[in-house]
Image: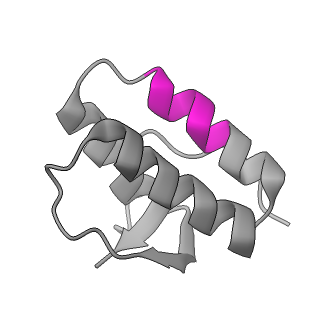
């Protein structure tokens, strides 16, 4: 099982940390809380509680919306 801590930067191959987890975001400019919630729910459902909790912690530490979007793209597949 992979480490539950989400990556802060994208990998060299451009793959997110959990490529099997796909999250549909209708707009990348949505409120931060909704974006965090959608990703956390998907991680909790498909990977486990530890991955979702680690993502939540990292997401709330982001200092800006672009930084949060980068974290999301580095963590899961976004459609």
The front one of 12 and 57 is 57
Residue in the image at 39% along x and 39% along y: 33
Which of the image's four quarters has the N terminus?
bottom right
Apparent side of residue 77 relative to residue 56 in the rendered image (left or right)? left
x and y percent of residue 30 in the render? 20, 49
State how many labels appear.
0
Magenta residues, dominant SS class = helix
Q: Is residue 15 visible?
A: no
Apparent side of residue 70 relative to residue 36 in the rendered image (left or right)? left
Residue in the image at 47% along x and 33% along y: 59
x and y percent of residue 55 in the render? 59, 42
Up/down of 17 relative to 62, above or below = below
x and y percent of residue 49 in the render? 81, 53
The reply to whether the magenta stretch includes residue 35 is no
- To which quarter of the image does residue 58 belong? top right
Apparent side of residue 40 relative to residue 2 in the rendered image (left or right)? left
Identify the coloring: one colour
- To which quarter of the image does residue 42 belong? bottom right
Apparent side of residue 18 relative to residue 29 in the rendered image (left or right)? right
> Which residue is most to the right?
1
Residue in the image at 27% along x and 33% along y: 67
Residue in the image at 45% along x and 46% along y: 36
x and y percent of residue 53 in the render? 71, 41
The front one of 6 and 64 is 64
Q: Is residue 31 visible?
A: yes
Which of the image's four quarters has the C terminus?
bottom left
The front one of 70 and 35 is 35
Which residues, given as a range, are shown in magenta? 54-61
């Amino acid at each position: 099982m992979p480490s539950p801590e989400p990556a802060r930067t994208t990998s060299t191959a451009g793959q997110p940390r959990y490529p099997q987890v796909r999250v549909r975001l209708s707009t990348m400019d949505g409120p931060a809380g909704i974006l965090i919630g959608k990703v956390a729910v998907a991680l909790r459902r498909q990977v486990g509680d530890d991955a979702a909790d680690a993502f939540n912690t990292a997401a709330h530490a982001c200092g800006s919306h672009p930084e949060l979007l980068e974290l999301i793209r580095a963590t899961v597949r976004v459609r």
